[in-house]
Amino acid sequence: MPVTFLLVSIFCVTGLTSCSNSPAAAATVWLCRPGLAHDPCTASLETTVVNGTGSKRVVDYEPASHPAIDCFYVYPLVSLQTTPNTTLRIDPQETAIAELEASPFSRVCRVFAPMYQQVTFSSVSSQQAQQAQQVAYASVLAAWRDYLAHYNDGRGVVLIGHSEGADELDQLISGQIDNDASVRRLLVSAILTGANLTVGADGTGPFSEIGVCRSASQTGCVAAYNAFFQPPPSDALFGRPDPTVLNGIAQQEVCTNPAALAGGTGTLVSAYRVQLPTQEVAGSATDGILEYYPAVSTPWIQFDDQYSASCVKSDGANVLMVTQIHDGSLLTAAPNPAWGLHVDDPNLALGNLVDLVQSETAAYISAHRPPA
C-alpha cells in the first residue's frame, strides 16, 4: 500500500485533513448503486417459502419502483485477498455477500454499497491490525461523504452492516452522525448485526443521541444483536461487553429482537440465497449454520416459522437466543461454538429486518412530511 495513501487515511480519521479534498483519496467504487449495469443488490428475489409443516410456495418479491428512502450497506469480512487491506477490486466474494445480505432491502429502499479497503483475515490479529482498521474506516468514511454529497438529496437513510461492516458503521455513527443534528435527522435507523455494541446498564448509550430501537415505528435508532442457539461459552467472541465498565458505568451488550422489539419472544423469518457467484462466503447456505435445507429451484429459500428468538442474558452475555420450532434445518455454530450463529446473523431474521425497515420508513415519512 502506498505510504501517501496510508498517511492520508490516518489523517482523515483523526480529522487532520479532509478526505474529500485530498488528491490521494480514491474515488468511490460502488458495489451497489442505482443505475449500475450489473448491480448485485437488485438480483432476483424469487423465493421458495417453506412453512412449519414443510409445504412450499413460490413468491417473486420485486424491488421497489420508487422507494422513498435509501439504504447504505457495508459488508462483513469476506475478501480472500492477502494484503493487510483489500484493494477496491470487486471480487466474487463481495458480489455474493451483497446478494446474500443486501439485495432483499431493495424491496424497500435504494441500496448503496461501497467497496472499501476492509481489513483482511491476514491482518485481523497482526501487529498491522490497528493501522489496517484506520485505513478501512477512512475508506468507508470517504464513501459516506461521497454518498451525502452526490446521491442523498435530503432522503432518509438506513445504515446496514454486519460484523466488520457493523463495526465501521459504529464508528461512522459515533463520529459523523450522532453529534451532527443535520445528518442525524436523515437517519431512519441503523441495523448493526454481529457487532459488540454496548449500552450502559443505567440506560445510557449506545450513542449520546441515538438510542436502541424498541418499536417498529421508532426512527433514528439502532437495532443490533448477536445470535446464538446455545448459551455462549466462556470464550465466545460476541455478546459480552469489552470493557465491562466504561466511565464508571457497567456495560452490557445491545440486543434488540427483530421479531419482538419491545421484548419477549417472536418468530423469525429467515432467508438464504442459495444461488451465488461463489459459495466461498461465510453465511451462504453451504458455508453457514444450516446443516441442510430443502432442495429448491429458486435463488432464495425462506423459512417462515422455523425459528423463534428472544434476547437472553446468560453469564455476562446478552444475546439473541434462537430456538428451533419445527423439524427442519438444524443450526450449527460455525466455524466453532465461540462464534455462535455469527456468520448468519442477518439471514436468520432477514424477513423481519426488511419488514422493520418498511415500518420505520412509513413512520419516518410521516414525521418528516411538510405540513399542509
Image (spheres, rainbow, N blue to C red):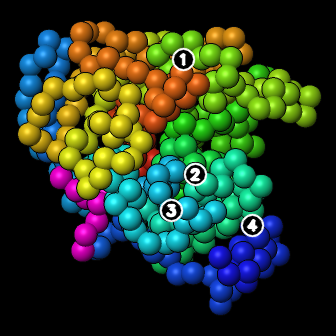
Decide: is 370 above or below 224.
below
Image x and y of residue 263, in percent: 52, 16
Q: Which of 271 and 343 is in front in this view?
A: 343
Spatial separation of the CA atoms under disc 3 and disc 4: 24 Å
Highlighted range, magenta? 37-44
Q: Is 134 displayed left or right of 304 in the figure?
A: right
Q: Which of 362 and 213 is in front in this view?
A: 213
Image x and y of residue 34, in percent: 32, 69
Q: Is 253 displayed left or right of 225 in the figure?
A: right
Q: In the rendering, which numbered label is found on residue 81?
A: 3
Q: Which of marks 2 and 4 is in front?
A: 2
Disc nearer the start of the sequence (3/4): 4
Disc nearer the start of the sequence (2/3): 3
Residue at position x 37%, y 15% in the image: 308
Q: In the rendering, which numbered label is found on residue 311?
A: 1
Q: Which of 223 and 300 is in front in this view?
A: 300
Quadrant in which the N terminus appears: bottom right
User: Which residue position holds label 4?
Assistant: 13
User: Do we see residue 263 in this rendering?
Assistant: no
Q: Which of marks 3 and 1 is in front?
A: 3
Q: Is residue 181 magenta?
A: no
Decide: is 18 above or below 193.
below
